[in-house]
Amino acid sequence: MSSIVIVGAQWGDEGKGKITNGLASNANMVVRFQGGSNAGHTVDVNGEPVVFHLLPSGISVQGVLCVIGPGVVVDPLGLVEEIDGVRSRGIEVGENFLIDVGAHMVMPYHRAVEAAEEESRGGSAIGTTRKGIGPAYSDRYSREGLPIGMLASFGEFEERLRAIAARKNEILTRLHGAEPLDIDAIVDDMRRAADRLVPHLADTPDLVREAVASGSNVIFEGAQGTLLDISFGTYPYVTSSHTSAAGVAPGTGVPPSMVGEVLGVAKAYITRVGAGPFPTELPDGEGETIRDRGQEYGATTGRPRRCGWLDIVALRYAIGVSGMDRLIITKLDVLDAFETIPICVRYRIDGVETDRFPRSAVELSRAEPVYEEMPGWQADTTAARRHDDLPPEAMAYLRRIEELTGVPVAAASVGAAAHAVVQFAEIL
Ligand code: GDP
């Protein structure tokens, strides 16, 4: 069996898309297991950046079967638009792309309800992408969701959609004082989306299990990051799905016993989008330098990302939750400019030093970072392809991450380009 899981080891945006895309050339299948179009994976395809929101990051690699698993929530209209955009870049989306019938759909009313709820939260908004992801997952759990397989029986789907949409209009108008949505227009849009998406629908768990069992190389692609996991992140500043490696089983139908190595992707520093506690945040100065050098703006929303030094306490926690066997450190080149590079090795909470990552957002917001300083290398690493191309200080930084986490670093990424990687060991 040869399957690997690629998950974010921080608060998302770690560069998982680039890593997945790079490894996909050795894979037979790439399976997305959670999240929705709130994800934005920027991948270098023939020198051009292409952003995938729902399509698995292996879609540009020929001969790889890409699957959206049952744990994902799919915005049908957004997906059709994404397919068209990707095709216009010369990327094939045909028989190489399957959507599991059990993935639930994000409907226009999910986006409308989410926007109204975020508005009403005022200063305590979660800072969601307003793509309707949370409400779509909520409906799934409250048995008011619409699995995408229903598009194949449009009559039954339309009946259920109309009933649910009428209830959502009540919520929008009565509770939020918002305009009702035009249900006929939603039905028409969905009919058009169904024409395009039904050919890609499939019952995928058996297929993926068989691929893993027969020794095919299968990549399970995560979105967001382990620290945003609905169960293990700092609730409520989390996303609505299981972003940790544990999400693979319910998100694909492949049992935990069949899941192979877990690779955690972490930046050489850390970022966060949206609200929530962030102990190593650098509000200005160095934080701005990181943001500029790393182009830290959301791929889905364009929002500036909050930036800070690498947080080992949070990273160790994420490694534990996702069972990460090895790490891939991305964006090492972003740190090329710094004379010294602090690493947060412990927190101080209420005057007491600890290496425990608090589960509670309230407690985490009281955590102050305790830093250890590493010498910077102040040299351009973007052309490095072998470990001896990296400055000794950069290697020392990576080694220190290994020592502090107890987990080996399999590769370091030194630029957005697909080939800008220094690989230390074989991965797939
Ligand atoms: P993902 O959602 O985890 O795939 O991450 P995003 O795509 O949201 O953000 C990663 C961004 O960093 C993308 O724009 C990538 O092109 C870029 N990127 C990835 N790896 C590197 C790297 O090693 N160095 C630099 N400078 N940029 C990188």
Image (spheres, grey):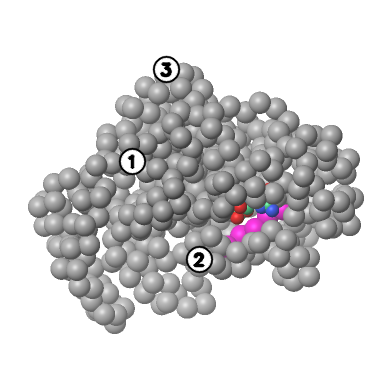
Dot 3 alpha-carbon crowd within 10 angstroms: few under 14, some 14 to 19, many 20 or more: few
Tell me which label, 3 or 1, sits earlier in the chain.
1
What residue is shown with label 2? 301
Q: CA distance from mark 2 to mark 3?
A: 40 Å
- Give the residue displayed 75% in from the left and 55% down from the top: 334
Residue 319 in the image: above or below residue 125: above
Figure quadrant of the C terminus? top right
In the rendered image, residue 413, in percent from the top left (x then y), is placed at 69, 43
What residue is shown with label 1? 94
Any magenta on residue 271?
yes
Which of 417/12 is in front? 417
Q: Quadrant of residue 410?
A: top right
Q: Amino acid at mark 1?
A: Gly
In the rendered image, residue 409, in percent from the top left (x then y), is placed at 71, 35
Residue 366 in the image: above or below residue 195: below
- Give the residue displayed 70% in from the left and 36% down from the top: 411
What residue is shown with label 3? 214
Dot 2 alpha-carbon crowd within 10 angstroms: few under 14, some 14 to 19, many 20 or more: some
Judged from the image, the secondary structure of the residue bearing numbered disc 1 is loop
Tell me which label, 2 or 3, sits earlier in the chain.
3
User: Badges 3 and 1: C-beta atoms under 8 Å apart?
Assistant: no
Q: Is residue 81 left or right of residue 222?
A: left
